[in-house]
Image: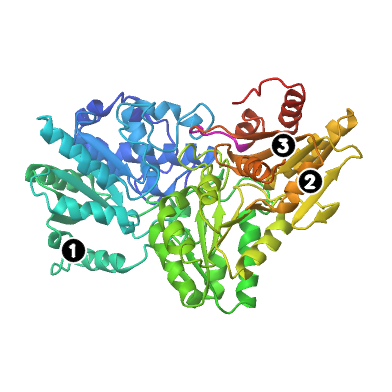
Amino acid sequence: MTVPTTVGTAPELRQPDLLAGLDGPEDLRKLPADGLPELAEQIRALLIDKVSAVGGHLGPNLGVVELTLALHRVFRSPHDTLLFDTGHQCYVHKMLTGRQHDFDGLRQAGGLSGYPSRAESVHDVIENSHASTVLSYADGIAKARALSGEGDRAVVAVIGDGALTGGLALEALNNLGAAPGRPVVVVLNDNGRSYAPTAGALATHLAALRGGAAAGNLFEQLGLAYLGPVDGHDTAALELILRQARSLERPVVVHVVTDKGHGYLPALADRAEKMHAVGVLDPLTGLPRSAAAQPTWTDVFAEHVTELGAHYSDLVTITAAMPGPTGLSRFADRFPDRFFDVGIAEQHAVASAAGLATAGARALVAVYSTFLNRAYDQVLMDVALHRLPVTFVLDRAGVTGPDGPSHHGMWDIPLLASVPGMRVAVPRDPAGLRTLLAEAVDEQEHPTAVRFPKAVAGSDIAALHQLGPVDVLFRSTVHEVLIVAVGPLADECVKAGRYLADTGIGATVVDPRWVLPVPAELVTLARQHRLVVTVEDNIRNGGVGAAVARALADAGVHVPVTTMGLPARFLEHGPRADLLAAAGLTAKGIVHTVLCARADRPHPRT
């Protein structure tokens, strides 16, 4: 197979002989320097071959091949500690630490994680897949090394320029610079991007440093030594500067300039994201292998938020370095003056939205569900305390699939349930997303959140009738079991309701639409049934089911409530459908739960 490469002299995807013979970093250090260009070619070929077959983070890893080779030749992992932020740039690290033969299972159930994994290797020290944390880890590990007399063990933190825009990273730099005796090597992988081009004044400063400016160096002003910039695709130069950094025995920033997607023409031609994250694609062309994809929830949101932008001249949208993945690129193209990318800074995004709302704008923050965790304090104390009508759009809510435990959006509802005044909507279909998003943006008295999964949006599910804000999706003549469907699980709930009705068990299936606070009409419906079963793709602890049970108790409605949801533990990576099925969140699982509850047997998923 021929791949469109821009580096080296051999365009064919060969058997990776050099790479196959590496059992670990010690073998890499024995390899003659003149063999490194060939090894780098083989690594890139394997990356393109394996990632194009299963999907994953291609561009970031193509950009750090030579850098990772140099790191493992200069430092002795695991004696020395290598930390990667963000962890999706660890594929080459995995190959060099003995896992190169396992890439057929990358991000597949039971296979390699797409991020560092402590269960996989002693060389993976932290499972770091949320950006901007690595410098704080490095600071703490270096402190512990000093206290235990292990100061000879180097601590190296690899961080991208995008991740450096996060407030936590800047807090760590502030502390590292104040401790001249703490020998932490900060490798700044500067490719000018995260998903999108790096935003803010830091990007301007790094560009000046790349251009040779010496005065006013931020890192030196903070008390760190500074080396570079150095070509991140020159292994010899990298080894030289890394050895120099190690010898300084103080906090030092090594400024490495890399090219995201380096060596692969389709990645270099992708101006939007440099193939940051890809699905299954043709390695020759870089184009998706599948036929035209059905619209996803993100696609539906992207279209409708742009329509709302035309309707509301005061609608302003904010993202934390993810305009494309969160669906705001189209809005940004049409209304550039009302779109703000604040970098990887979720806390600032939310507090800035609070400022926008204070000044009268309709502020909308689009963020992955899992990343909202980082800004909980701002949601609570900067938005809710001031009763500001900020809209939060939570993409990747529930089970996300191959990205694994750090990216499953399982925690948002319990967090938001504790926020006074917060209204949370969960659409079941594309029509519902459009309606609920419009209602959220129109809300002027309370903060709102609209959540949806990483999945195909599917077809609309019509309601039989409405009881206030509650949609009734199925109702048999006998009212015995009330199934409360939360968002995208509505289809499975309707299937379960029909099956139960066919077997003589009266069932009603409803979609509250606005799940928090619990609608009074839902309490009224519960009075008419003997059992309530709630079904949500969110942890059961503190979720919608818990809120429904509390609302019934407060109203003196003594109807038992059985809650179905995800277990309160970190779920591994795997297909979304399989993970939902494992949690019983299918029609079959719902029926089984109803039958167990009716028979007064212990619930099987406590």
Q: Earlier in the sequence, mark 1 or mark 3?
A: 1
Q: Is residue 13 above or below residue 232?
A: above
Closer to the camera in the image, 47 or 449: 449
Residue drawn at x 45%, y 68% is 354
Residue named by callout 1: 218
Q: Nearer the viewer, residue 205 or 416?
A: 416
Question: Residue 452: x, y in percent?
Answer: 61, 51
Q: Is residue 491 left or right of residue 226?
A: right
Report the Cα–Cα distance between label 2 and label 3.
13 Å
Q: Which residue is mark 2?
A: 525
Look at the magenta stretch and give its main secondary structure.
loop
Q: How is the model colour-coded?
A: rainbow
* Percent position of residue 388, x then y: 51, 67
N-term-proximal mark, 2 vs 1 = 1
Horizontal side of residue 339 vs 6, given as left or right = right
Crowd rating for badge 3 (residues with CA inside 10 Å; few <14, some 14–19, many 20+): some
For the point 54% across and 64% down, the residue is: 328
Residue 567 vertical position relative to residue 358 in the rendered view, above or below: above
Residue 407 in sight: yes
Q: Quadrant of residue 100?
A: top left
First-in-chain label (2 vs 3): 2
Q: Nearer the viewer, mark 2 or mark 3?
A: 3
Vertical comparison of 476 with 331: above or below:
above
Using the image as rendered, state which of residue 606 and residue 435 is in the foreground.
Answer: 606
Q: Who's the residue at 32% across and 24% down the image?
A: 21
Asked where in the image residue 443 lies, by quadrant, the reply is bottom right
From the viewer's perspective, is the residue at label 1 or at label 3 nearer? 3
Alpha-carbon span between mark 2 and mark 1: 61 Å
Amino acid type shown at disc 1: Leu
- The kind of secondary structure element at disc 1 is helix
SS category of the residue bearing label 2: helix
Q: Which mark is residue 558?
A: 3
